[in-house]
């Protein structure tokens, strides 16, 4: 959720840290701060608001060649400068930045208060800084002091710490919250996301859960929580720096919507088998024999990933004829799930760091379940902790509002369903038809992107409506829910996405003359029932925009606008129907003048529970 960067070397730490933090702005934050060490003391700059406010408040920046920085999203304590990171201990010797939550903060705070500590903030992080500060004051090395503090803490922590009396090193640790190291020549970086490093280096080391690293300008060493040495492998940062640049687009969200044809093409590349009418996801091959024993599939995720999971469950049930369901990872994580050895569990997370999804994954693995992963981020926790999985290769997604990751995740579940279907009952002929449809998908998405002017015009008229309804059937129910989520996320318009079957069981009461409704009516087995829903909506005066076949005259006679779908295989429908909904949300937020890429109260990766 929050962003962490740190630097040690010969260059300006301020410039290195600010550059990294700016790369992490997409995660969402409400305040920012930097600490460097110069002339034997901590140099501090903290500010509420965006990084530009921090820069304006610190003309010329801070001196020094070692430091740490943070963009905060408030959890413990309100949005105030006192609660900004980095936090110092009461003797102002060490400074610390922290992503995560200290679960036993109240017990630790009571203990420290009883010993005379006077806290300056409402945060749980200040408790950690005080524990580390007390350790170094007793003569411990910074590494040992961090180890001692972490072994007393319960909860999650991605941290970086600097000591003004030992400015030749940083200490970083990962307890449930991601931390990566950047490797340079005579300099080192640390961050919560590889994206913050890519502009400076191509080499990184990913800390595993429970690892602590001591960094100097010359290199690093890594230990576990018992202070035993750990060997680490240097990896290449795959995302190109320019892929995260805005280019000619006004917003990252619009850029990422338009990147979907290429993202889908990358996601499919090398994974389709035209001759056999099947797909092959590399990670599945080592478990192929066990997959024949699978009797059920459970997809799980949060938010947009949950909706892609719901599409996947529908496709798995409909085409592979394997009973499947989707579950909210946040609920799955706390319900003490009954784990069956004949069930395949599929965890979906764009970042691979979603706390609730990882908690569910770990609970399932603890009970012996077979877990596959779908993620966009190479080296993420989800990628490392699942038994096998697939990267969607959508490229960096900077906007908080997910678009290309959704369609790439849906595609990944579709490839999984296709492979299962061919392993079970789907004929080679039908499989080849499906493969051909997938090969045509990037071009068909480009066709759907041509509806942008129409979506903009509809948004100009209805973008600020008091309520908007999205209706679909079958695999397009989660697409309707995703469309409503996009509108809520960035345009702050109350919206509901639902099944046409559920509409008359209550939500139809919300319809009044002129209210905008988006109806997803592809030419598949759900069409006839959707026609009935259109008649119910029209009878109550709704203004209906349908995403439907261009030659469906019956639909045209029941709605106000039609955004045409190209001829397509029913299985790819959810990837095509969502495109106009993304565009509508974007142009609605644009009309209303909101910060599209950084909506209020939201963060890109929810790494705390």
Image (spheres, helix red, strand yellow):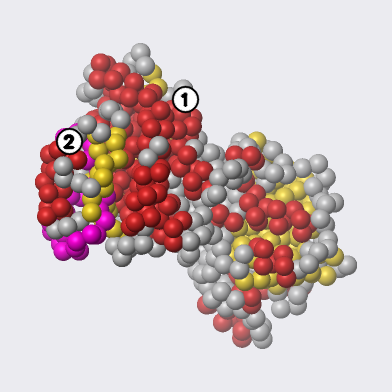
Q: Position of residue 565 (x, y in %)?
A: 29, 34
Q: Residue at x 71, y 57 (%)?
A: 18
Q: Position of residue 257 (x, y in %)?
A: 46, 42
Q: Residue at x 38, y 23 (%)?
A: 439
Mark 1 vs mark 2, CA separation in Å = 37 Å
Residue 464 lies in the magenta-colored region: no
- Answer with left or right where residue 503 lies relative to residue 69: left
Q: Are marks 1 and 2 in contact (CB under 8 Å)?
A: no
From the image, tell me which residue sits under label 1.
269
Q: Residue at x 16, y 53 (%)?
A: 537
Residue 508 lies in the magenta-colored region: yes
User: Of residues 368 and 527, which is closer to you in this image?
Assistant: 527
Most extreme residue toward the right is 39
Region rendered in magenta: 498-526
User: Of residues 468 and 486, which is closer to you in this image?
Assistant: 468
Residue 447 location, quadrant:
top left
Could you tell me if residue 199 is visible in this image?
A: yes
Q: Position of residue 380 (x, y in %)?
A: 53, 44
Mark 1 burial class by Cα count in 10 Å: few <14, some 14-19, many 20+: few
Q: Check disc 1 and report its element: helix, strand or loop.
A: loop
Could you tell me if residue 342 is visible in this image?
A: no
Q: Check disc 2 and report its element: helix, strand or loop.
A: helix
Mark 2 burial class by Cα count in 10 Å: few <14, some 14-19, many 20+: few
- Give the numbered dot on residue 250: none
Picture layout, residue 589 above or below residue 397: below
User: Of residues 323 and 153, which is closer to you in this image?
Assistant: 323
- Answer with left or right where residue 451 lies relative to residue 25: left
- Mark 1 vs mark 2: in front: 2
Q: Residue at x 37, y 16 (%)?
A: 274
Which image quadrant: the C terminus? bottom left
From the image, tell me which residue sits under label 2.
553
| Sequence order check, earlier mark of 1 and 2 | 1
């Amino acid at each position: 959720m929050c962003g962490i960067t740190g630097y040690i070397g010969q260059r300006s730490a301020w410039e290195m840290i600010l550059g990294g933090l700016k790369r992490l702005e997409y995660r969402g934050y409400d305040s920012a701060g930097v600490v460097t060490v110069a002339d034997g003391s901590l140099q501090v700059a903290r500010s509420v608001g965006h990084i530009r406010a921090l820069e304006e408040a610190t003309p010329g920046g801070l001196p020094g060649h070692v430091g740490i920085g943070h963009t905060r999203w408030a959890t413990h304590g309100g949005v105030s400068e006192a609660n900004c990171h980095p936090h110092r201990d009461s003797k102002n010797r060490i400074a610390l930045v922290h992503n995560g939550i200290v679960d036993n903060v109240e017990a630790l705070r009571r203990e420290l208060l009883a010993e005379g500590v006077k806290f300056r903030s409402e945060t749980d992080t200040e408790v950690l800084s005080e524990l580390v500060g007390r350790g170094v004051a007793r003569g411990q090395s910074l590494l040992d002091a961090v180890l001692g503090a972490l072994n007393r803490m319960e909860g999650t922590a991605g941290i970086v710490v600097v000591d003004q009396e030992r400015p030749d090193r940083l200490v970083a640790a990962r307890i449930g919250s991601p931390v990566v190291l950047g490797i340079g020549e005579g300099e080192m970086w640390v961050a919560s996301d590889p994206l913050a490093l890519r502009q400076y280096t191509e080499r990184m080391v990913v800390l595993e859960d429970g690892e602590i690293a001591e960094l100097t300008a010359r290199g690093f060493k890594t230990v576990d929580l018992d202070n035993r040495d750990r060997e680490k492998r240097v990896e290449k940062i795959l995302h190109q720096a320019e892929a995260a640049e805005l280019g000619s687009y006004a917003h990252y969200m619009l850029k990422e919507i338009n990147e979907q044809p290429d993202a889908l093409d990358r996601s499919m590349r090398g994974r389709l088998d035209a001759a056999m009418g099947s797909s092959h996801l590399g990670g599945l091959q080592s478990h192929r024999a066990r997959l024949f024993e699978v009797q059920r599939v459970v997809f799980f995720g949060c938010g947009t990933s949950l909706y892609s999971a719901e599409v996947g469950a529908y496709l798995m049930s409909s085409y592979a004829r394997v009973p499947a369901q989707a579950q909210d990872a946040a609920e799955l994580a706390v319900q003490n799930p009954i784990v069956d050895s004949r069930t395949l569990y599929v965890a979906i997370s764009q970042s691979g760091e979603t706390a609730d999804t990882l908690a569910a994954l770990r609970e399932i693995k603890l009970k012996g379940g077979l877990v596959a992963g779908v993620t966009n981020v190479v080296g993420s926790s989800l990628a490392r902790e699942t038994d096998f999985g697939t990267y969607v290769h959508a490229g960096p997604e900077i906007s908080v509002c997910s678009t290309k990751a959704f369609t790439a995740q849906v595609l990944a579940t579709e490839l999984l369903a296709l492979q299962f279907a061919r392993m079970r009952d789907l004929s080679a002929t039908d499989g080849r038809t499906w493969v051909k449809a997938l090969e045509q998908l990037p071009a068909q998405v480009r066709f759907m992107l041509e509806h942008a002017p129409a979506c903009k015009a509809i948004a100009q008229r209805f973008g600020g409506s008091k309520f908007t309804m999205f209706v679909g059937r079958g695999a397009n129910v989660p697409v309707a829910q995703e469309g409503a989520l996009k509108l809520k996320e960035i345009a702050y318009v109350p919206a509901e996405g639902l099944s046409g079957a559920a509409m008359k069981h209550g939500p139809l009461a919300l319809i009044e003359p002129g209210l905008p409704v988006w109806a997803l009516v592809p030419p598949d087995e759900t069409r006839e029932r959707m026609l009935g829903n259109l008649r119910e909506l029209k009878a109550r005066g709704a203004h209906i925009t349908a995403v439907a076949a261009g030659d469906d005259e019956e639909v045209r006679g029941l709605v106000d606008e039609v955004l045409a779908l190209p001829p397509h295989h029913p299985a790819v429908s959810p990837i095509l129907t969502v495109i106009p909904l993304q565009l509508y949300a974007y142009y609605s937020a644009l009309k209303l003048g909101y910060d599209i890429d950084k909506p209020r109260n939201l963060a890109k990766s929810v790494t705390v529970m």
